[in-house]
Image: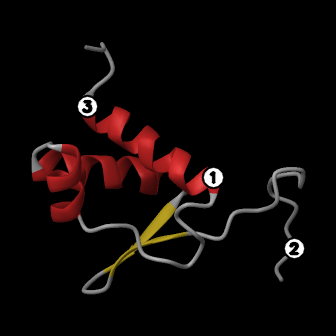
Amino acid sequence: MSARPLYVQLADVIAKKIESGELAPDRPIPSENHLADEYGVARLTARRAAQELRERGLIVTVRGKGSFVVQQPPANAPEGNGTAD
């Protein structure tokens, strides 16, 4: 039991998978239905977790296609350096 909302806990789990490389950039994350089934949560909880990840800038959602991990800058690169590769 935690005081943190369940959707934030789920978002943290997925964020760790992104950081570890288990969920690679430009690859889809599991669907909301799959996340709900895998983690035993309501679909709304999975949807709110995805929203949290979008707000953190970790995923983007393409209507009709799904949600994808965004390209992350290298950990040692300063954020907002304004360069595009």
> Which disc, if any, is residue 20?
1
| Percent coordinates x, y for residue 40 in the rendering | 14, 43
**Sequence-wise, which precedes: disc 2 or disc 1?**
1
- Asked if marks 1 and 3 touch (Cβ < 8 Å), the reply is no
| Percent coordinates x, y for residue 35 in the rendering | 24, 56
Residue beneath disc 2: 83
Marks 2 and 1 sit apart, C-alpha to C-alpha, by 24 Å
- Image position of 9 with respect to 42: above or below: above
* Quadrant in which the N terminus is drawn: top left
Q: Amino acid at mark 1?
A: Ser
- Given residues 22 and 45, the one toward you in this image is 22
Whether residue 78 can be seen here: yes
> Which disc, if any, is residue 6?
3
Q: Nearer the viewer, mark 2 or mark 3?
A: 3
**Sequence-wise, which precedes: disc 1 or disc 3?**
3
* Residue at the image position 82 percent from the left and 79 percent from the top: 84
* Residue at the image position 89 percent from the left and 55 percent from the top: 77
Mark 3 element type: helix
Marks 2 and 3 sit apart, C-alpha to C-alpha, by 36 Å
| Percent coordinates x, y for residue 4 in the rendering | 33, 20
Marks 1 and 3 sit apart, C-alpha to C-alpha, by 21 Å
Q: Amino acid at mark 2?
A: Thr
**Which residue ends up furthest to the bottom in the rendered image?**
64
- Image position of 83 with respect to 17: above or below: below
Whether residue 56 can be seen here: no
**Which quadrant of the view contains residue 37?**
bottom left
Mark 2 element type: loop
Q: Residues within 10 Å of mark 3 (few under 14, many from 20)?
A: some
